Image (cartoon, helix red, strand yellow):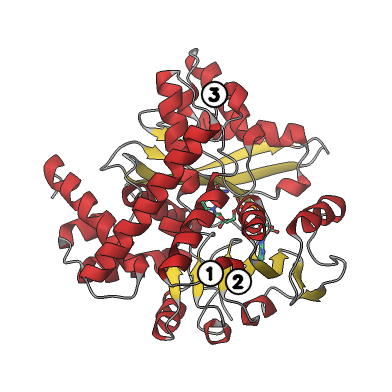
Amino acid sequence: MAQANVFQVALNTLNHAGKLGNIDSRVLEILQAPKRIMQFRIPLTLDDGSFKVFQAYRVHYCDALGPCKNGTRIRPNLTLDEIKALAIFMTIKHCAADIPAGGAKGGIQADPSTLSNNDMERLIRAFVRNLQPKGPWVDVPGADIGTGEQAMAWMLDEYEQITGNHCPPAINDKPPILGGSLGGEAATGVGVFKVLIRAASDMKMNVKESSAVVQGFGQVGSVLASLLHEEGCRIVAVSDVFGGAYSPSGIDIGKLKDHVAETGKVPGFPGADVISNEEIFGIESDILVPAAVQSVIHKGNAKDVKATLIVEGANGPVTTEADEDLLENGVTIVPDVIANSGGATVCHFERIQGLSDMYWDLETVNKRLEQRILKAYQDAVTVAREFETPSIRTGAWIHALRKLSKAMKLRGWV
Ligand code: NAD
């Protein structure tokens, strides 16, 4: 089945929530497209002697509530629509989590596995040189798929070389030694876990006696799976880009981590059956956490889903049609803009720490993260109830759109 266009999915959610929430049509019109799109090409002679021109993007979706922030994705088939979708998700995520920031996303169309360390560094530095405008009060890039602490350290260094000032709040997701926040790397997975436990409790589901399926075993999926396993939940299937491991009696996540560290992939985990990424959605379980890529649960496979609770670790993993079908079947979905907002929240903490030059201990970071994400969840649930919809997603978007609407009116934009 053809993948749904994730930007169209985002606009469908925006327009549905806007209509139901009676949001000013002028506000919705502004939000139909990004405020600013930067597109540039980066020429590079690679270490192997070949020459390539890389397509790059940075999208500032909306800055009504503050500077644009977050995410730089590097992957081979990256599209502008994907970046636009992720940028509007960031806009809504910041509003829903009470973060005074706008939403941005950027990326480079490249396959990191084919680049040397040196190629990668030159690509990242060129990306920062091409960004305009940038800085802690305009646009603060962070990491996403294909970028991590090292890439963000290069970004910070390039930014500081250009400006001649030390400025840790200009870049997010840095290593702590350069001003990054403690708990930053695990934040999204920790947030998904906290919200999952609260949503399960609201459904009177005891996680210790439940089973779960986790798609994606990267930064988000592996942290979430470890915490769920430690909580006593039986994790019956896990997958990555290569396929999945299935064991009805439960997978030991610590051992799976060792296996992945050794072999580089999830399938082949001793004692578990090998399954495909499509099969994983039909597996019997109480909880399903898609934590890989967008649009993986669609009209064609939504009917196979057995779980009664879906917590979206990935951005946009459920298409509009699948969302409707799942809600009709009584499935509770904690949407991406709430469930995976832990990373954005700790990025906000990182910027605060950088601006103030006061750095927090891990306990403080995690305590504040938990407070914020549970409040964001509760706000979304409360607004969903107000509008008598089973969709927490719609509740979260209406809650966010009301704030954006207020800010835009006060600014005189509408
Ligand atoms: P990652 O690159 O660390 O891990 C991604 C995982 O998904 C890997 O296990 C990979 O093998 C797997 N995967 C990739 N393509 C797949 C496919 N087609 N089918 C099945 N599995 C596939 O990425 P991450 O940081 O864990 O991010 C995962 C998702 O969470 C993304 O959608 C990302 O946008 C979202 N997210 C991440 C963060 C964060 O802080 N890392 C924050 C918010 C949202």
Residue type pointed to by label 2 = Glu
Mark closer to the chain start, 1 or 3:
3
Label 2 vs label 3, nearer the camera: 2
For residue 292, side relative to residue 98 (left or right): right
Quadrant location of the N terminus in the rendered image = bottom right
Quarter of the image for residue 290 reads: bottom right
Residue at 28 percent across and 68 percent down: it is 384
Task: Tell me whether the residue at label 2 lies in contact with that at label 1, contact meaning CB atoms closer than 8 angstroms.
Answer: yes
Q: Count every numbered label the image shows and give the total.
A: 3
Residue on which the image places disc 2: 209
Residue at 52 percent across and 38 percent down: it is 142
Mark closer to the chain start, 2 or 3:
3
Which numbered tag is attached to residue 318? none
Residue at 66 percent across and 33 percent down: it is 150
Q: x and y percent of residue 81 in the render?
A: 47, 59
Most distant residue in the top direction: 164
Q: Can you say whether 356 is above or below 226 in the image? A: above
Quarter of the image for residue 209 reads: bottom right
- Spatial CA distance of label 2 from label 1 is 6 Å
Q: Is residue 85 visible?
A: no
Q: x and y percent of residue 280 in the render?
A: 67, 76
Quarter of the image for residue 14 reads: bottom left
Residue type pointed to by label 1 = Asn
Q: Is residue 206 visible?
A: yes
Q: x and y percent of residue 252 in the render?
A: 76, 61
Q: Residues within 10 Å of mark 1 (few under 14, many from 20)?
A: some
Residue on which the image places disc 3: 179
Residue in the foreground of this view, choosing between 374 and 125: 374
Secondary structure under badge 3?
loop
